[in-house]
Amino acid sequence: MGQREMWRLMSRFNAFKRTNTILHHLRMSKHTDAAEEVLLEKKGCTGVITLNRPKFLNALTLNMIRQIYPQLKKWEQDPETFLIIIKGAGGKAFCAGGDIRVISEAEKAKQKIAPVFFREEYMLNNAVGSCQKPYVALIHGITMGGSKIDRDKSFILEEHMDKINSCFSANTVEEIIENLQQDGSSFALEQLKVINKMSPTSLKITLRQLMEGSSKTLQEVLTMEYRLSQACMRGHDFHEGVRAVLIDKDQSPKWKPADLKEVTEEDLNNHFKSLGSSDLKF
């Protein structure tokens, strides 16, 4: 047997072993009795990260981030670690993203954790994105900031793609709204209902973020998002959204400003501008 054929067979064998390991951990991610917010375990040649806050949909805390980051870097350099898996405990959620309620409440209490939290979270995101070992996220259940692509099912928005492309191919939120109004279909009107509930500032930030981010590297995107996170922490709408959805749960946020036309280009530029020496650095 030639060396190339041997290498090919070994690659297939290793891929088979990785698949079996992943399936094994997926079956075991339903429940854990451990009290720690995150579990970091070495099982054979696999490093396993378990997000363990099922009552809070495994939302990330600063403490969890500070445990995961150094362990991820350690496993990345460990010659006896061939695979890294991250999963969520409880069976209901993989991860609901950062625990924004805790962040908002801390900010209101004049505890400035937002700069530290987002800085370290984005440093962890970059470490995941640049990890030199196979890194597998078992995205099962509620997941904020990601998606479970089932290749056996058609894309849920497939039937609407023509309308999405025609209505949302615009350079301003106002143009998108106009396109949806002119379309007039039940799908378009449903999207208008959703958009009209959203923060006008966040709508304009999001569109610009999508447009600028399409040509950026991961590190450039994380730097942009860090700037946005800090600007939003200083503003009104982030905290009002947390109040309306997670604290009072009245689902009736009062946005400031309340109208798209009141969100100026200067407002937008202030969200995206450099933070100078306080910028995110890798």
Image: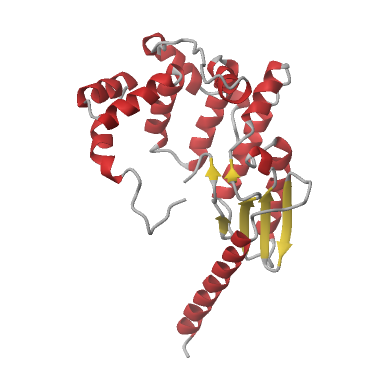
| Residue 260 percent across, percent down from the top left | 38, 13
Residue 95 visible, this orientation: yes
| Residue 139 percent across, percent down from the top left | 54, 51
Position of residue 261 relative to residue 93, above or below, is above
Colouring mode (rainbow / by chain / secondary structure / one colour): secondary structure
Name the image quarter holding residue 124.
top right
Name the image quarter holding residue 26.
bottom right
- In this view, the residue farthest toward the right is 35
- Report the side of 8 relative to 119 (left or right): left
**Image point 56% across, 26% down: which residue?**
229
**Image point 62% across, 32% down: which residue?**
118
- In this view, the residue farthest toward the bottom is 1
Name the image quarter holding residue 162.
top left
**Image point 47% across, 50% down: which residue?**
148
The one of 247 and 51 positioned closer to us in this rendering: 247
| Residue 46 percent across, percent down from the top left | 66, 64
Position of residue 29 relative to residue 173, above or below, is below
Residue 59 visible, this orientation: no
**Image point 69% across, 36% down: which residue?**
61
| Residue 218 percent across, percent down from the top left | 49, 42
For the image shown, how many numbered marks are present on the structure?
0
The quadrant of the image that shows the C terminus is: top right
